[in-house]
Image (spheres, rainbow, N blue to C red):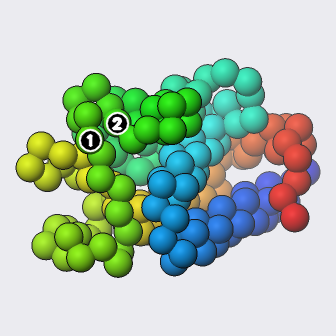
Amino acid sequence: MDKHEVLNQLNHIRDFQINDLKKADDAGANFLVCVGCLNATELLGGIRTGHLGEEGHVNTRLRGGIDVLGGVYKHHDQDVLELRHSMVHAYLGRTKNYREVDIMNKDDPSLKSLPLHLGIQVVNGRFVVNVSSWINNLEVAWGNLMRELGANDEQLAAIAVALEKLPQLR
């Protein structure tokens, strides 16, 4: 797979994932969208760290995705890790620091008074997830990562090997 094929495949994965997240967000499936955002963050990290498609390395991939997202996600990286594990394994939204996690989308009236560009934030001692903003943050992060990858032939070659092991999205 040459450089352009790898970048095209990554664009396809990005579009597939982001479009699905937006559809679920429009339907108000906040919990599922949050799980999807965590998964998308982990995918970004798998690409960044070179652990795409490998068994294990969940925390490494997720931290790598958090690094790509930057900002508030890095500030709350441990909470994001714990949120992922609680949602995937216990079907609960919580962290050690925040026993209650509010998962909302752009249509929730209580978000109107909060900064809408933040996918996660702490408000009055509660961990608040705005899945609509997280999706937007993921789109920006994908763009940043794709620019970074366009200049890194060695990393693209490693991604090509990983992509060949993964099932293709249709």
Q: Is residue 123 above or below residue 49?
A: below
Q: Considering the image in quadrants, where does the C terminus appear?
A: bottom right
Q: Is residue 27 left or right of residue 95?
A: right
Pick whichever, 47 or 168, lies toward us. 168
Circle nearer the N terminus (2, 1): 2
The alpha-carbon separation of the residues under discs 2 and 1 comes to 6 Å
Pick whichever, 139 or 149, lies toward us. 139
Residue 100, disc: 1
Tell me the kind of residue under disc 1. Glu
Q: Residues within 10 Å of mark 1 (few under 14, many from 20)?
A: some
Secondary element under disc 2, as helix, strand or loop, is loop
The image quarter containing residue 56 is top right
Residue most extreme to the top:
56
Q: Is residue 110 above or below residue 162?
A: below
Q: Position of residue 49 (x, y in %)?
A: 59, 33
Marks 2 and 1 in Cβ contact (< 8 Å): yes
Q: Position of residue 102 (x, y in %)?
A: 29, 53
- Can you identify the residue that label 2 sits on? 94
Query: Residue drawn at (51%, 77%), measured in percent from left and top?
Result: 26
Work out whether residue 47 can be spotted.
yes
Q: Position of residue 124 (x, y in %)?
A: 9, 49
Query: Residue drawn at (62%, 52%), measured in percent from left and top?
Result: 149
Q: Is residue 147 above or below residue 111?
A: above
Q: Is residue 49 left or right of residue 103?
A: right
Query: Residue drawn at (67%, 30%), measured in percent from left and top?
Result: 51
